[in-house]
Image: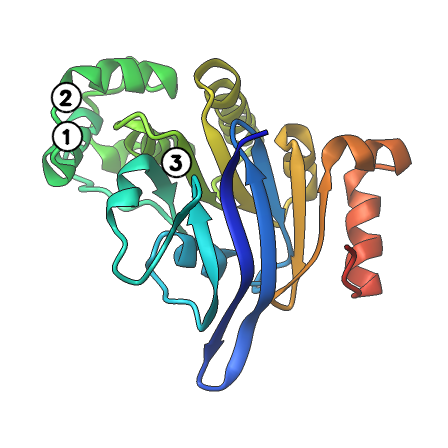
Amino acid sequence: METMIQINQLSKAYKGTEIVSNVTMHIEKGEIYGFLGPNGAGKTTIMKMILNLVKPTSGEIRISNQLVSHTSYQYLENIGSIIEYPVFYERLTAVENLKLHCKYVGYAGENRIQEVLETVGLKGVEHKKVHEFSLGMKQRLGIARAIMTKPPLLILDEPINGLDPVGIKDIRMLLLKLKNEYGVTILVSSHIVSEIESIADTIGIIHHGTLLKEVKMAEIRKESNLEEYFLNIIQGGRQHV
């Protein structure tokens, strides 16, 4: 399989305290990689380093085998992302927000807006102002914005956080659709084990800034379920190769 993201010995320290420690990850093209760990484990920091929002203390990141440096930004044209909570112009409609995004990033494909809104399940509410949207609708609009430019890679930080069961199911089905129908590679983080189990091809388990395990979901299913596997790894607190 072709590699989309390769991370080697990545570390980040703030004021002398290491919050990400020698993390190595391998994400294949066309897969959903579930990044699983408790709150504060280092997931968001690693995603921010991939997106050049935070500079690593040491280590390297390669996207499609291209080395990411502190001056690299062109590669971001091929990545859609939601980090933490998506922010919109609340008094504008979904369509108006996406038009502004296209202008901001210099993308000439405004004619794709209706197609993208249909893809994420917002057809019929596209002219509603965003402040009228539920949290789940805002998350779907965030994903619409992230896929607007047809990026081959999506990086989503806790996209189901705070959603009700219906909203969680909607996002789950949307991510599977993006992978299966459009071939998008997705790195998605969560602390909700059951949701990662239902969509991921590969699992990365992180705790206290250290990647304890990277394993195919198919291998986990041979032994147990993801919740049991995850708890064994976290409670063992040891790194598995």
Viewer can see residue 61: yes
Determine which residue is flagged by label 3: 139
Colour scheme in use: rainbow
**Apparent side of residue 201 relative to residue 80 in the rendered image (left or right):** right
Please identify, in this view, whether the residue under mark 2 or under mark 1 is nearer the observer. 1
Measuring 53% from the left and 82% from the top, which residue is drawn there? 17
Q: Quadrant of residue 195?
A: top right
User: Relative to residue 54, is residue 136 depicted above or below?
Assistant: above
Which residue, as the protein is rendered here, is positioned at the far right? 223
Which residue, as the protein is rendered here, is positioned at the far bottom? 16
Q: Amino acid at mark 2?
A: Glu
Of labels 2 and 3, earlier in sequence is: 2
Disc 2 and disc 3 in contact, CB within 8 angstroms: no
Q: Amino acid at mark 1?
A: Tyr
Q: Residues within 10 Å of mark 1 (few under 14, many from 20)?
A: few
Measuring 24% from the left and 34% from the top, which residue is drawn there? 130
Please identify, in this view, whether the residue under mark 2 or under mark 3 is nearer the observer. 2
Disc 2 and disc 1 in contact, CB within 8 angstroms: yes
* Helix, strand or loop under label 1: loop
Alpha carbon separation for disc pair 2 and 1: 7 Å
Disc 3 and disc 1 in contact, CB within 8 angstroms: no
Determine which residue is flagged by label 1: 107
Q: Amino acid at mark 3?
A: Gln
Q: Residues within 10 Å of mark 2 (few under 14, many from 20)?
A: some
Determine which residue is flagged by label 2: 110
Alpha carbon separation for disc pair 3 and 1: 21 Å
Residue 181 in picture, x, y percent from top left: 47, 13
Alpha carbon separation for disc pair 2 and 3: 20 Å
Viewer can see residue 163: no
* Helix, strand or loop under label 2: helix
Q: Residues within 10 Å of mark 3 (few under 14, many from 20)?
A: many
Residue 128 in picture, x, y percent from top left: 21, 25
